[in-house]
Structures are given as C-alpha cells and as structure tokens.
Image (cartoon, helix red, strand yellow):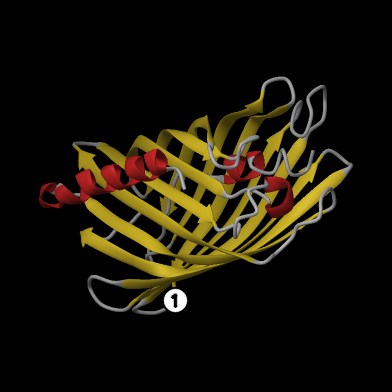
Amino acid sequence: MNMKMLAMLLAATSIASGAQAQGWETSFDGGLFATDRFSTDTEIEGSPFLGTYLGGYAGTRFGSLKFAIDGRAEFTDDRGADDVDETGPLHTAVLGARLGSQFANTYFGAFVGAGWFDGYDSEDPMRGDIYGVEVEHFLSNGASVYAQLGHVRAIGDPGDNEFIGYDAKIGYLTPVGPRTTLNFSLEQAYSSECFEDCGGDWGRYVALGVEANYKLSERVDLVGAINYATIFANTEDWGSEANLYLGVRVPFGARPTSALRTPMGGFHAAGWMEPLD
C-alpha cells in the first residue's frame, strides 16, 4: 500500500467534508472488492484476489462556477506474491479536480488529475497524469447522462512500457426507486504508439460497469458494483478483469448530485503493461 497516495486522498476528503457548512456536497467511500483475472501472456496465479478501496468527493459552487475534487484508490492483496506478472496490477488510484459552469440543465467543464499505477516495481506505484473535458445533462426525473474525454500519460519504463493516449467514458445515472440509483458506464482508453512495447505497439482498455447505490439512512448508503474490463496489448496478448465491489458511502452535508468522477481507465490499463509484456 502506498501511504503517500492514501494520505493525499484522505486529506482532500477531510478538508472538503470540514467545509460542509459552506454548502459543499461531500461523501466518503470505502469497501472491499474481489477481482478475477486472466492473461494470455503469463499465468495468473491465485486468482481471484481480494482487495480494498477508498474514495471521496467534494463539490461546491462559486457564483456561476462549479468546482469539485474527487479521488479513488484500489489496493489488491497479492498474498505475498510480489510479482505483477503473476497477479496483474495491485495499486491503481486517481486524484482529480474539475471546474465548469452549468447552463440550464447541462454542465460543461474541464478536469485535471494525477493517477498511480504499477510499473516495474509493484511495491512502489508510479505516477501519471490526466486532463480533459466533460459534460453532464440532467434530466427531469433526477437522472443524468454524462461524457468525458481525457488525455492520459503514464510512463512505466521510458521507451518501452508507456501509455500515452485518450480515455473516453460515457454513462447514465438514474433513480430506480425512492432509495436506489443505478449508474451505468462504458469506458475505453487507447494508447496508439506504445504499451507493452513502443514503436507502434498499441494498447486498449475497454470496461463496462454498473453501480447500485441504496440509501440505508440519511447518513449511510450501501454501494455495490460490477465491472468487467478487457485489456489488449497490440494483437499478441490480452488480459481481463471481472471485479465485484461492496462497500458503504457516507455523505457529509448535502449528497453529491453529479455523476462525474475523474476517469481511471488509463491507469488501470497502464498497470497491465508489464504483465502483458
């Protein structure tokens, strides 16, 4: 576990939650997940694996502007293997900020963030960055549709394992009852010139997910999610993840109304560069 990465996430959430009296929408997430993995390049040993995740969100308005920060970190337990070739990536995280304006029922904005992924040393996650634009349209029934397009740079080994490309995500958040909301998403990240190797060896990450949020009380939500991702390393190799998440979400102050969060797909993909090389 990278304590510096975790401390940054917790500090950002704590600062925002302490500002709830000034009209912030904030929440904190935590829970467990199981991940079932496959790779054509190396033998994944011990799958499925268990892990923990933490996340946070805080958003507010400054006049006509809307500002938010968010973060998420996922830590997989490799049961002492200490070899990402045998387990797949163990650490993935993102910490981002966004700023934009809402016109009628549609929000337009931009985001920037830092991400962490496993390079060659699984005990010391490497840092990358992401920036991009986003839009969210709010419907009359409390639902929203959203889209994000970002550029990711995640260098594992310069000139060898590199992810430099786009991360695109679309989604639909909808209430399905007085206590339950569902969030459907489709994400693709693509690096055209480098991935397992450089010189035209592309890499692609495609993930389909659904998250259910059930309000247990005014201050505690039960959250469950399913995510399936496929990672292609050029035409030679590919890997997959089937992930199941279960945790709680604790709102502080007003509940978040936006479905926008900093995309993680590019950093999930970057963590697979070494296992698929």
Place of residue 39 in the rendered image (x, y in percent of width and height, measured from the top left):
79, 53
Q: Is residue 182 above or below residue 206?
A: below
Where, by quadrant of the figure, is residue 76 drawn? bottom right
What's the residue type where badge 1 is placed?
Val
Place of residue 66 in the rendered image (x, y in percent of width and height, measured from the top left):
28, 40
- Residue density around tag 1, few if under 14, some if 14–19, many if 20 or more, within 10 Å: few
Place of residue 123 in the rendered image (x, y in percent of width and height, measured from the top left):
55, 42
Residue 180 visible in the shown view: yes
Closer to us: 71 or 75: 75
Q: Residue at x 74, y 44 (%)?
A: 275
Q: Is residue 139 above or below residue 14?
A: below
Closer to us: 245 or 50: 50
Closer to us: 17 or 61: 17
Q: Residue at x 64, y 42 (%)?
A: 271
Task: Report which residue position mark 1 lands on.
Answer: 176
Q: Residue at x 40, y 36 (%)?
A: 109
- Describe residue 109's horizontal placement relative to residue 147 as left or right: left
- Describe residue 202's horizontal placement relative to residue 99 as left or right: right
Q: Is residue 199 above or below residue 6?
A: above
